[in-house]
Amino acid sequence: MSAKTLGFAVQSEDRPVLDELVAYFGDGNRSAYLRATLKVMKSIMIADRLREAQAYGQQRTAELGIDPADVNVLVTVAASGNSPFRSWSSPPPVSGNPSADCLGIIVDAAEFALWLSPQFTANVDRVLSDLFKWERPEVDAYLEAVVGAAEHSAGGVLAEVPRTVHDCPDHEDNLILDLAAEVGALILVSNDSDLLSMSPWRGTPIIEPTGFAAKVDAMRRHARRRR
């Protein structure tokens, strides 16, 4: 794809700051700096949209008195907490929602890619609509943000997922394992007790959101110490 030149106006007093940032983030190349900035700003935009959805979800959960623990991870993300959905410092902020912390790792678009299937997003849609009584615009906005996060992380929604796995007695769990098999997943994060009991499944670890967030935090701390 060919590049196109775009013009931007910069105030004279902002030029030193721009030059400093271009030197640091783009090695003096303004195009490289802009590409790096686009990635960061996209993460911020997705995080803002997820925070809005979570605030709405927390209100609905409280009004209905529903325990969001026994549902899939992406439903738990939106049901409670006060999550940044962005990179964290050490130690990470306590959001009260490990599932949301995991999605925040995906929003960072640094180490992991999130893959979804139409069946999985349809299940999230159904649970939020039927159980948590979300209004349609809020459901659509949340799913759009989740899919946006997946695509931003270099994953996305895999339209066609072959039915090949029959290892679990739960049909919906097998659909998740189908997706994991098709994309060659390195790890599967779940709250589901049946899936967790199968870990490692065909060599793929299946861990709870708390464990995944803790491992990523430890990995990032180690990387910072080596700099």
Image: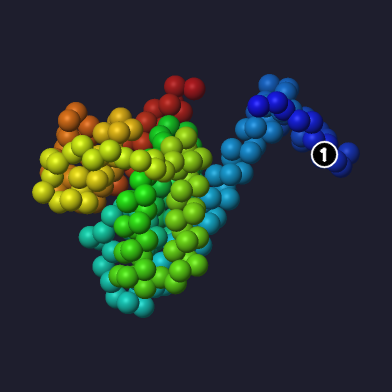
Q: Name the kind of residue labelled 1 in the image.
A: Phe
Q: Position of residue 89 (x, y in %)?
A: 47, 41
Q: Furthest residue to the right?
A: 12
Q: Name the residue nearer the viewer: 99 or 126.
A: 126
Q: Position of residue 88 (x, y in %)?
A: 47, 43
Residue 137 as seen in the image, left or right of residue 203: right
Screen quadrant of the N terminus: top right
Q: Furthest residue to the left?
A: 169
Q: Specify whether residue 148 is in view.
A: yes
The residue at the point 13 percent across, 45 percent down is 168
The residue at the point 77 percent across, 36 percent down is 17
Image quadrant of residue 83? bottom left
Q: Position of residue 169 (x, y in %)?
A: 11, 49
Disc 1 packing (10 Å; few <14; some 14–19; many ≥20): few
Residue 171, compared with residue 178, is above or below; it is below
- Mark 1 sits on what residue? 8
Q: Name the residue nearer the viewer: 93 or 192.
A: 192
* Secondary element at tag 1: loop
The residue at the point 68 percent across, 21 percent down is 27
Which colour assignment does the render follow?
Answer: rainbow
Residue 131, compared with residue 15, is above or below; it is below
Residue 114, compared with residue 223, is above or below; it is below
Image quadrant of residue 188? top left
Q: Position of residue 115 (x, y in %)?
A: 38, 40
Q: Specify whether residue 106 is in view.
A: no
How many numbered badges does the structure rendering display? 1
Residue 42 as seen in the image, left or right of residue 188: right
Q: Name the residue nearer the viewer: 139 or 199.
A: 139
Residue 18 as seen in the image, left or right of residue 214: right
Image quadrant of residue 167? top left
The residue at the point 72 percent across, 23 percent down is 29
